[in-house]
Amino acid sequence: MQALLDTLATLPLPTETGRFFHGRGGLHPGCEHWVLDWFEPVWVLTSFQAVSEDELARVGQALAARWALVAPGQALNWVFQCRQDHHAETRLMAGSVPEPHVVAEQGARYAVHVLKGQNHGLFLDMAEGRRWVRARAAAQPGLRVLNLFAYTCAFSVAALQGGAAEVINVDMASGALSIGRRNHELNGLEKGRASYLAHDIFNSWAKLKRSGPYGLVIVDPPSFQKGSFVATKDYARLMRRLPELLAPGGEALLCLNTPKLDTAFLRDQMAELVPALQFVERLPNPPAFADADPERALKVLVYRAPA
């Protein structure tokens, strides 16, 4: 765990929510199971395998020593989560977690929950995707957006902050959409520009098509969620629907977050199933998420419909 300890010894005073150690990227041999995130004002340390109490104590000591230097007089708040075999156990190690807990990213505010569940309400590796969506909306006044698998609607917040006219957020989880509503309120976004549909996307195509067409369709599904979505068989079903949802010249943002499938998984299927849509680019991931094998990292691809 030396690379993690070395990172702790040089931590800066954070100015924004983000990742500060990414062992999962494979660039720190022996530390592949560790990640460290800042959800202001709380550090969240995650291990993807069991670790000893001695290891946790060493991390705690290193973090406390560094925090005393960069934030003298400020309380150290940190949480540890162990994820193993699709189960997460979370512990408050020091300090406290605010309730409600709101963090900032790129001028936006989001509600998070770091003490429960594996997902904290905001996926940090998608920061550049949100930046791109905000810029796209700013460049295309009146943009209408369909946000599929919306979760807590962070893409919607970014789009509306950029100037989008309307965003339709679709997700089966009504609880996640409730947090999404709260995120819009936190950012002072006027009601009426965002809508929230707690629907099964695959049973809602007719309704979504009637509400279209859209200048931007965002597709950010889970890679594997039993009973809901399995990328290897269900992504193709989404791709086939894109032409009937997109306006002329409209764009689709296709996201894939599993290390088990590479960019070719998306590009080959798109070329076969929806050849009319043109590949534009793959968006970069935040530098903090650098990976020894970029094909294992988050993949976010942009496609454009014919004008």
Image (cartoon, rainbow, N blue to C red):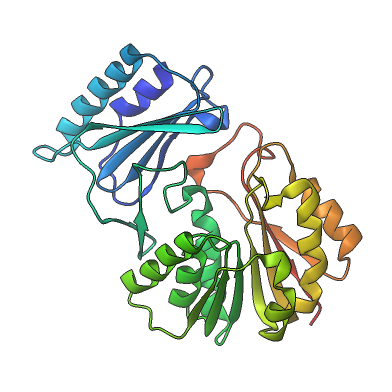
- Tell me the quarter of the image containing the N terminus: top left
Q: For this view, does 176 lie left or right of residue 259?
A: left
- Tell me the quarter of the image containing the C terminus: bottom right
Q: For this view, does 167 lie left or right of residue 221?
A: left
Asked whether the viewer can see residue 262, the reply is yes
Position in image of residue 293 (x %, y %): 66, 34
Position in image of residue 224 (x %, y %): 66, 44
Q: Residue at x 27, y 17 (%)?
A: 57
Position in image of residue 51 (x %, y %): 42, 17
Q: Quadrant of residue 202?
A: bottom right
Q: Considering only vertical position in the picture, is 80 above or below 125?
A: above
Position in image of residue 25 (x %, y %): 56, 32
Q: Residue at x 38, y 83 (%)?
A: 190
Q: Nearer the viewer, residue 211 or 248?
A: 211
Q: Nearer the viewer, residue 75 or 28?
A: 75
Q: Quadrant of residue 205?
A: bottom right
Q: Residue at x 47, y 77 (%)?
A: 160
